[in-house]
């Protein structure tokens, strides 16, 4: 009966070899780069404790099901549409300014109301005082002597606060043979994944090749949501197993980007409360591990404009952990608090680079100070 045992053993062995060949072929067919099965990323000098086991077999790259058929809206018509929305979204500020310009007599109460409205729009105390002082000089007690002059002062003061001198362009210059890397960070539900999708679409329309990294491995649906965005805009997504190491997925995405000559890798990270130290440390690790492969060009902090001053706290903590290079202010369409633009820039010294004004694929625009102020003034 010994021979039966040896035949069964032989059959099992053959099945195992066949299964491993099929797995290998499948991996190649989705375009994942060849990686050693287990790669110990070298610990960097600055963070000797960071090691990450990159299990390439667990990370897969999912390509778009079909080439994208949609054509992005032209930037001109996108901006015109966004500006219309902006003027209605900032209606509290716009109304306060319009009220001030229309009263017959400006007394102490009128100024108090005006200041209260500016503060309620999240402009911050300092900028509110500056704006009010500048206007007080122009507007007489007996009302607006010359509404055109007042409006001009208002426009230039607002513009000065928003600061048109800041560099708001995305830095996408990368080393030869390496992709530019954009990390997208922020608390839960601010609009990170949506922003990654919209941004990928803008970059693809600009003629750049893009790869997405789903470094949100906590939430079951997060990677699926990113893959869906990737399919919409025609780019592939690197994902890992649920509950896996987010740093490992980010590393793999950047490695794949380098191997396949991709211009920009956008890494979506899990939403995390800025108050949870462990999660914030993990975010720092994701960035350091990426940097073992390529420099991180941009760390974009996504802030929900409707959360007001709480957004300021988030901004402070995130910028301590990862060096934030730009703010994406989402949901300005649903907020009456456009003043947060000024407050957050002042606080961090980091410019608002992009704004989200809706859930649609084309509802992301570069932040344009002149357009923003014109929107606030309802022009
Ligand atoms: N109105 C509006 N909704 C937006 C905007 N950006 C994102 N959203 C919506 O906000 C919700 C959350 O967006 P997500 O992109 O899933 O947010 P997230 O930060 O990735 O969420 P987590 O992964 O849970 O942290 C979704 O319903 C989006 O459609 C925007 O600019 N305007």
Image (cartoon, rainbow, N blue to C red):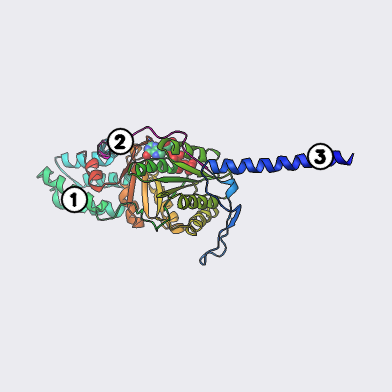
Residue 362: x %, y % from top left: 34, 37
Magenta span contains residue 232:
no
Q: Estimate how packed mark 1 is, as few (under 14), some (14 to 19) or many (20 or more) residues with alpha carbons within 10 Å.
A: few
Depicted 71 relative to depicted 41: above or below: above
The reply to whether the residue tagged 3 has its Cβ within 8 angstroms of ligand 1 is no
Report the front residue among 187 and 23: 23
Task: Give the left or right position of residue 249, taking residue 298 as reference.
Answer: right
Rendered image: mark on residue 73 = 2
Q: Residue furthest bottom?
A: 45
Callout in the foreground (2, 1): 2
Q: For marks 3 and 2, give the CA distance.
A: 65 Å
Mark 1 falls on what kind of element? helix
* Dominant secondary structure, magenta: loop
Q: Estimate how packed mark 2 is, as few (under 14), some (14 to 19) or many (20 or more) residues with alpha carbons within 10 Å.
A: some
Q: Residue furthest right?
A: 1
Magenta span contains residue 73:
yes
Q: Earlier in the sequence, mark 2 or mark 1?
A: 2
Q: Earlier in the sequence, mark 3 or mark 1?
A: 3
Q: Are marks 3 and 1 in contact (CB under 8 Å)?
A: no
Q: For marks 2 and 1, give the CA distance.
A: 31 Å
Q: For mark 3, what is the residue?
A: 7
Q: For mark 1, what is the residue?
A: 156
Q: Earlier in the sequence, mark 3 or mark 2?
A: 3
Task: Give the left or right position of residue 15, taking residue 134 as reference.
Answer: right
Q: Which residues are magenta?
A: 61-80
């Amino acid at each position: 009966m010994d021979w039966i045992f040896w035949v069964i053993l032989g059959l099992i062995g053959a099945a195992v070899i066949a299964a491993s060949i099929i797995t290998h072929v499948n991996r190649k067919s989705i375009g994942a780069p060849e990686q050693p099965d287990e790669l110990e990323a070298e610990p960097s000098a600055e963070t000797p404790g960071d090691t990450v086991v990159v299990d390439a077999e667990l990370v897969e790259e999912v390509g778009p099901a079909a080439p994208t058929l949609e054509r992005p809206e032209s930037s001109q018509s996108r901006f015109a549409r966004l500006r219309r929305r902006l003027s209605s979204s900032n209606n509290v500020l716009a109304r306060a300014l319009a009220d001030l310009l229309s009263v017959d007599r400006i007394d102490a109460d009128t100024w108090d109301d005006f200041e209260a409205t500016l503060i309620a729009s999240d402009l911050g105390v300092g900028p509110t005082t500056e704006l009010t002082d500048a206007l007080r000089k122009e507007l007489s007690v007996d009302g607006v002597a010359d509404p055109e002059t007042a409006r001009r002062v208002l426009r230039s003061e607002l513009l000065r606060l928003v600061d048109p001198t800041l560099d708001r362009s995305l830095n996408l210059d990368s080393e030869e043979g390496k992709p530019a890397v954009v990390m997208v960070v922020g608390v839960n539900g601010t609009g990170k994944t949506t922003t990654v999708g919209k941004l990928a679409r803008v970059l693809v329309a600009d003629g750049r090749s893009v790869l997405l990294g789903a470094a949100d491995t906590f939430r079951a649906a997060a990677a699926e949501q990113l893959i869906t965005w990737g399919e919409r805009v025609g780019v592939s997504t690197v994902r890992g197993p649920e509950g896996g190491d987010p740093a490992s997925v980010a590393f793999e995405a950047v490695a794949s980007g380098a191997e396949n000559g991709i211009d920009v890798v956008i890494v979506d990270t899990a939403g995390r409360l800025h108050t949870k130290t462990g999660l914030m440390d993990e975010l720092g690790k994701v960035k350091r591990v990426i940097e073992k492969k390529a420099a991180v060009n941009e760390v974009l902090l996504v802030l929900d404009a409707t959360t007001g001053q709480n957004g300021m706290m988030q901004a402070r903590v995130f910028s301590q952990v990862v060096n934030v290079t730009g703010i994406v202010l989402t949901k300005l369409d649903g907020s009456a608090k456009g003043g947060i633009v000024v407050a957050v820039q002042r606080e961090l010294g980091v410019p608002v680079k992009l704004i989200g004004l809706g859930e649609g694929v084309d509802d992301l625009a570069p932040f344009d100070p002149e357009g923003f102020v014109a929107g606030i003034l309802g022009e």
